[in-house]
Amino acid sequence: MSVLRTPLVLAFLGVLVAPSAAQSPPEYEARILQGPGGAPASPLRINCDGVCVGDFFNTSLFFYDGVVWDAAGAPSTLSDDYGFLESGAYAIRDDGTIVGSGSMDPTEVSHAIIIDPGGGVTTLPSLAGDQGVVSAAFDMNDAGTVVGRSALVATPFWLSVPNDAVMWEGGVLTSLGTLGGFLGDARHVNASKTVIGSSNTATSDFARGFVWDPVNGMREITPAEPAGFGQVEDLNDQDVICGSATLGATPFACIWPDPDQPPTFLPVFPGDVASVATAIDEAGMVVGAGTLATGETRARLWLNGVAYDLGALLPERLPFPLARALDLNEGGQILVSAEFTPAFGFVDVVLTPLPALTGSPASISVGAGGTQQLGLNAGAGAASALYLLLGSASGTKPGLAASGFVLPLNPDAYFFFTANSPNTPPLAGSFGFLDGAGKAQAAFSLPPGSPPALVGLTLHHAYGVADAVTGAILGASNAAPLALVP
């Protein structure tokens, strides 16, 4: 029987789409991010492939150094990869483009930079020229609009001089200004070119959240009460902003569907005395942190009007508390920092919703050949279920939606080959039954001397899980990328 006639494939082709039930929180699989050489590091953002960026203090350089963690969690540094003497990687697009700051000249301080997927580095202009100016890029949308900050006068000490929130388009710099104070900082930009960030005011040195758009310009985010203020952390392409707003003197997690109206507060998790929402996806799922009466923080998830403890959504509990969710991608993966403990030190993790898929290594040489091991983990609730691993050479968005799930693969020739020819090279173990723990192992193998035309291609694999008797879809995994290199 052709695999295309199985309920699992038909459902993800949209033939057996059923109305989705109210979404409940998934369980998550945790992957620990190791700092370069075991040093403590600070990841900041995660893209749709599970690649993370951030920085750490490089004791060899005595400066901060940008870090990129591949989809398997292995770190590399901007100093080793590009020769930066000082750097930070602050955001990464789904296509792999990185923005941040860096300097390759010991006589120069860091400037805003763009690193394209091919490794090319572009230094962006600053408001006070090119000499002795600190600037940084913090985000970039799919159209190439970059936002960040720039000092107004030439000095390596950016906090001691005025800084404006800025935007770069096609390499051209525009000042977005401030809220009347001396320090503006643009942190995120979405598809409609709405920008959020923070700035102090003429009457207060304490930074407050702002929103800027091409029509209305910059204004302070609307507080929840006249004497209060708001802080902004993220926004999605529907212009919904998340962050926190004060009630009295206490901040609580909230969203702004309209930045010119007071915010909507998110539910308070039992025991939290304060909270913040740090990231929001296109479907409106929000992550962040709650503060306990002890002053400790715990990572939180808000979904369908309910607050959840992220640490409690792991079937296998970690030996340290999850302190703060930092970012999330459209595949549902969440970047989280853990609370410092003497036994484990500083730890950061990526949480992948079950069903989960891991792929290692993240790249294979077309000339030398190699194998990527693919680990499937759908959780114990999917024990003995049917699974089908599929591939795509044309990306993960928009993917295939069915039965309330999205398989993050775009149909193309490779997709239909993997659907019609399971357990056939280059894939092994792509179709079968999960074991009693809801796990299975598959592999993608590329023989040595494969066609050079494959170089530069990125393949993605993901799998769906179905009830072996009824054919009902039980879930879809994240996509695991595989870069084909020379």
Image (tube, rainbow, N blue to C red):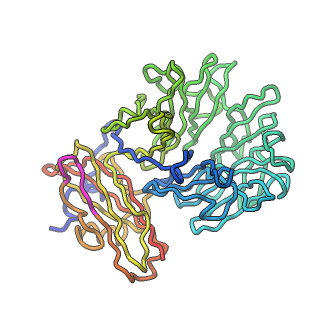
Residue sitting at x 65%, y 45%? 194
Residue 331 seen in the current view = yes
- Say whether residue 27 is left or right of residue 286: left
Where residue 339 sits: x, y (%)? 49, 34
Q: Is residue 243 above or below residue 61?
A: above
- Say whether residue 248 is left or right of residue 133: left
- Residue extending farthest top: 248
Q: Quadrant of the N terminus?
A: bottom left
- Say whether residue 377 is left or right of residue 194: left
Residue 139 seen in the current view = no
Nearest to the observer: residue 50 or residue 59: 59
Residue sitting at x 77%, y 55%? 173
Nearest to the observer: residue 263 or residue 385: 385
Where residue 181 sits: x, y (%)? 81, 34
Nearest to the observer: residue 34 or residue 47: 34
Nearest to the observer: residue 412 or residue 166: 166
Is 185 inside the magenta-drawn segment? no
Q: Is residue 443 above or below residue 218?
A: below
Q: Is residue 112 above or below residue 238?
A: below
Where residue 396 sits: x, y (%)? 42, 59
Q: Where, by quadrant of the figure, is residue 232 drawn?
A: top right
Q: Where, by quadrant of the figure, is residue 463 drawn?
A: bottom left
Is 440 inside the magenta-drawn segment? yes
Total labels drawn: 0
Where residue 435 sits: x, y (%)? 18, 51
Read off the magenta span: 434-442
